[in-house]
Amino acid sequence: MTASRKYLVIGGGAVGSIFGWRMQEGGADVSVVCRSNYAAVKANGYNITSIKFGNHTFTPNQVYRSAQEAVSNGCIYDFILVCTKSLPNIEEPTIVVSPSITDKKTTIVLLQNGIGIETYFAKAFPENPILSCSVYIDVIQLAQGTIDHGSTSKLEYGLYETSASDKVRDQQALKEFESDILAGDIDSKIADNIQRTRWTKIVWNASFNPISVVSGGNNSRELLRNPLTNQLLRLTMTEVLVLGEAITGERVASCSNDEYITNTFDFTDNRPNPVTPSMLVDYINKRPMEHQVILKNPIDLAKKHNISVPILETIYTFLITLEEKNLAPVS
């Protein structure tokens, strides 16, 4: 009998809990690194309410406080699922992960938002396989270890190749991950071009997320039904679509840009409940926002390719100004 592949989830919050749970359900050995919810998860596991999968208590094989602790017994993991927020403007993204990667056979799986997130890991671990993922999931941690999951859990993923990549080994890792994710009943597929897929997702993230904050704290429905913010969303999305096409060399939208934006608006507005974008949630809770990988990295690429993105630049300026004041210590 083949031994279960070993997975380590770094970032045992809402997203990490669902993917860890489903991997374990599919037969994998799953350990989790938790921070603020460590005590609750260690004692009771995750209490998950899910429209898609039903209600369940997910008990990881092991729960750790840190990546260092996760390898203190000499364990070499087959896959590391990185489910933390990517905040390179705050700290080097690989810091919380590095101690757990002790062998070049370990595959790094990035379940994070943004553009250019892979470069940090490719530089630190040039010989390890890297899978870049675009995650579509509606899930929230209501309290420590208490997870509310809706009906969506979709993953598109592909290899991030570097000059040091071992293509045969990396393809094998890709097939193993595909087998495990499908065994866990996650809707998933290997992307033909994962960078194009990432740009497709960031069309929403680079518009609804920051505009929800700079407009004064509006959810998706409020943004769409106000003519002024509706138009700003449309113009921002158009900039991102044009930029993504220039960077990837492929069309980002599967139809005309205008039709794609209209379809995205309709899909978002027709959800049972309005979306409170994650940047707005972070802003309200006085946490750093993911503006570096969602806005600044695309802006830097635009400058590199001499592409004008004045709306993205303006929104970014307002956003970081608001964040600076929001996170400033009270004197």
Image: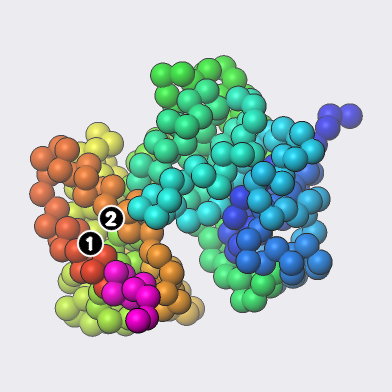
The reply to whether dot 1 and dot 2 touch (C-beta < 8 Å) is yes
Residue segment shown in magenta: 323-331
Neighbours of disc 2 within 10 Å: few (<14), some (14-19), many (20+): many
Question: Residue at (75%, 54%) from the top-left corner?
Answer: 63
Residue at the front extreme?
Answer: 331
Q: Secondary structure at mark 2?
A: helix
Q: Quadrant of residue 281?
A: bottom left
Q: Quadrant of residue 183?
A: top right
Residue, disc 2: 295
Neighbours of disc 1 within 10 Å: few (<14), some (14-19), many (20+): many
Asked if residue 139 is positioned above or below residue 245 in the image, the reply reads below
The magenta stretch spans residue 328: yes
Tell me if I can see residue 190 in this picture.
Answer: no
- Is residue 256 or residue 288 the one in the foreground? 288
Q: Secondary structure at mark 1?
A: helix
Percent position of residue 91, x then y: 43, 51
Image position of 234 (left or right of 164): left
Residue, disc 1: 316
Image position of 135 (left or right of 174): left
Percent position of residue 144, x then y: 67, 72
Question: Residue at (47%, 36%) from the top-left corner?
Answer: 121
Q: Quadrant of the C terminus?
A: bottom left
Nearer-N-terminus badge (1/2) = 2
CA–CA distance in space, label 1 to label 2: 7 Å
- Is residue 257 or residue 27 the one in the foreground? 27
Question: Residue at (49%, 78%) from the top-left corner?
Answer: 272
Q: Quadrant of the N terminus?
A: top right
The magenta stretch spans residue 307: no
